[in-house]
Amino acid sequence: MSVNVVTVVKDDLEGIRRTSKSVIQQSIPVHWIVVTPRGYPDISEYVEGLKLDGIVDAIIEDDGLGVYPAMNQAISWCDKEDWIWFLNAGDTFADKDSYSKVISVIARTTKKWVYGGHFLASHSGSIITEMPAAKQFKSSNQLFSRKYVSHQAAIFKAQFLQRLNGFNTQYKIASDWDLMARASQICKGDRIPETLSIFYLGGLSTYSRQQGNQELLKIRSIQLSKKYVIKNYWWFFYRSGRNYIVRRFEIANPEKANSIRRFRFLVRKKLRKKLD
């Protein structure tokens, strides 16, 4: 049994460099698997160099059809007794002991998946806020973006992912949230009270918020009960308007947008402390 950190990369050399630096800095050796298609010589050369140096354990060549098909290929490749932690190009561990913390929890857990918290960071790398691990995973919270779990901080047993048939590739942006919602119907997961990873804004999910919003509308209608029907559509239209405004503001004032995010999260945390 091993914990395989799986990184999918296509044409993001800067991202894979950032992830590799984080892997190298871990306090114990990381079992690292990289999934990448042909046709990107800069990426191939860099990843092959990492393998020669003993940093990457295996390279899986995928067909370049997208992130989720590539992640599914890794799921099929891994031994059923392995665990899988998807940390894609540009993602990083939260600190030098993140991997060892997960190893320790997995050694004693009876659950089929575990999850922790994550940091939210700007595209330039500055930390915006810390998103602690939810005390209990709830599909309704996840799919309405409340106390949600980032897939960069969720680690699954490979056999469990294989049983779930991996990621649903009809979804291009929100398949990770769909997967966690489906997983929670079978196993609620084991909470790790640690912040495990850093998620950087500016990737596919950031630039495709509207598509993600449409996919989540469909996922909620499938995963949640009928009592959420009105809220589902209200949330969809609210997020549609909000996403449009936020995206335009981000383009014009990226640093100010991040400053507003920091202030908003700070206010939210203070309010929660008062309520607690």
Image (tube, helix red, strand yellow):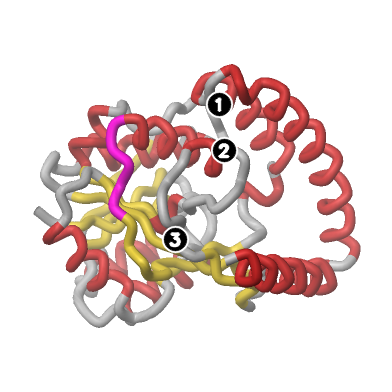
Q: Is residue 78 left or right of residue 188?
A: left
- What's the magenta bit mostly, secondary-structure-wise? loop
Image location of residue 93, percent across then percent down: 40, 70
Q: Nearer the viewer, residue 55 or 183?
A: 183
Image location of residue 97, percent across then percent down: 30, 78
Image location of residue 119, percent across then percent down: 53, 69
Per the image, label 3 sits on a secondary structure element best described as: loop
Q: Amino acid at mark 3?
A: Ala
Q: Which mark is residue 133?
A: 3
Q: Amino acid at mark 2?
A: Leu
Identify the residue at image location x=27%, y=39%.
75
Query: Could you tell me which quadrant the C terminus lies in?
Result: bottom right
Q: For the view shown, which residue lies furthest in the front direction?
A: 275
Q: Is residue 193 left or right of residue 160?
A: right
CA distance for labels 2 and 1? 8 Å
Question: Magenta residues, as a range?
Answer: 186-190
Disc 2 marks which residue?
143
Q: Earlier in the sequence, mark 3 or mark 1?
A: 3
CA distance for labels 3 and 1? 22 Å
Is there a contact, CB below 8 Å, between mark 2 and mark 1?
Answer: yes
CA distance for labels 3 and 2? 15 Å
Image location of residue 250, percent across then percent down: 82, 60
Disc 1 marks which residue?
219
Identify the residue at image location x=31%, y=26%.
165
Identify the residue at image location x=59%, y=21%.
221
Task: Write down the quadrant of residue 53 in the picture.
Answer: bottom left
Q: Does the magenta run of residues contain 187?
A: yes
Per the image, label 1 sits on a secondary structure element best described as: helix
| Label 3 crowd (10 A; few <14 / some 14-19 / many >=20) | many
Q: Is residue 205 left or right of residue 185?
A: right
Q: Earlier in the sequence, mark 2 or mark 1?
A: 2
| Label 1 crowd (10 A; few <14 / some 14-19 / many >=20) | some
